Image (cartoon, rainbow, N blue to C red):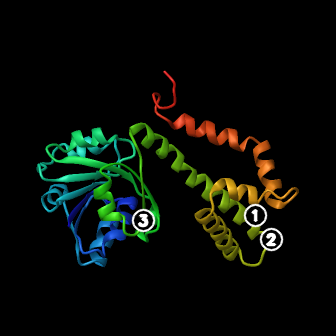
Amino acid sequence: MRIGVIGCGTIARAAVEGIVLDGHNITVSERNTEHASFLAETYENVQIADNQGVVDASDVLFLGLMAEVAPDVLGPLTFRTSQVAISFMAGATLEEADALIQPARATAIMMPFPGIAAGGTPIMMYGDTGIVADIFGNRNSIFPVRDPDEMAAYLCAQAVLSPVALMVSDAADWLGDRVSDKSQGEAFLRMLVASNLSTTACGPLIEALNTPGGYNQRLRLHMQTQGFTTALKSGLTGMLPTAANGSR
């Protein structure tokens, strides 16, 4: 497959690294020199071009731009009717991305995570499940959503990753002050969280860790008393578009 990447930032680079050994011919834009140069120097099937060169060399496009700059970047380019695009732009709907690349078509929007470089990551997406599964499905789990409102809700909910990482980091810092090997402590906590959540649903896991007076129950109840749950849900709701959160 001939794949082009317009906007080669951190996430787009990770997406390329996740598929680069699958036999595709990949052309990346020179917009981010560091990432583009690394990919081209590391993999013989990756080349660099200006944005129009990326379009000309590709049948499938990844749109890895920030939504606010996309009109200025994509507007001057000439696309082909036969081309399709997958948008990585969190701030633009699929319909908005599609309007920017006519007569090509944006058929799917997906939000990759950094872990896509190694595989084994969830991919939330809306639109053409087939093309996303064809390119990324061999190593990752595809989570299709029903409509733009569901996509908006998933986009908000996925932001839990950063506070979870901060919680683990803060706990690792606390632990590091009390043990001889701080890096081992963080590695233990990261594996603890990742392995248990990957194999057990949240409800049963919370129940299994609900021993009266146990460490897990005591810390969870302390955090809930401090307003953790309320702050989390209000923060998520506040990020929803107006129509999706029920406000007018």
**View extreme (top): residue:** 248
Compared across the picture, whether 30 is left or right of 197 comes to left
Mark 3 or mark 1, which is nearer the start of the sequence? 3
Q: Residue at x 38, y 42 (%)?
A: 91
Q: Is residue 112 above or below residue 46?
A: above
The residue lying furthest to the front in this view is: 204
Which residue bears the numbered disc 1?
174
**Residue type of the residue flagged with mark 1:** Trp
Residue in front for this viewpoint, 196 or 57: 196
In the image, what residue type sits under mark 2?
Arg
**How far is disc 2 from disc 3 in space, using C-alphas?**
37 Å
Which residue position holds label 2? Answer: 178
Question: How many marks do you count on the picture?
Answer: 3
Q: Do the CB atoms of the residues marked 2 and 1 lie less than 8 Å apart?
A: yes
Using the image as rendered, state which of residue 178 and residue 158 is in the foreground.
158
Q: Is residue 195 left or right of residue 22?
A: right
* In front: label 2 or label 3: 3
Q: CA distance from mark 1 to mark 3?
A: 33 Å
Mark yes or no: residue 33 visible. no
Residue at the image position 15 percent from the left and 55 percent from the top: 52
Q: Provide the secondary structure element on which disc 2 rests.
A: loop
The picture quadrant where one finds residue 53 is bottom left
Which residue bears the numbered disc 3?
140
User: Which of marks 3 and 2 precedes in the sequence?
Assistant: 3
How crowded is the residue under tag 1: few (<14 C-alpha within 10 Å), some, or many (20+)? Answer: some
* Amino acid type at image mark 3: Asn
Are discs 2 and 3 less than 8 Å apart at CB?
no
Q: Viewer-nearest of labels 1 and 3?
A: 3
Residue 20 appears anywhere in the view: yes
* C-alpha span from label 2 to label 1: 7 Å
* Nearer the observer, 118 or 91: 118
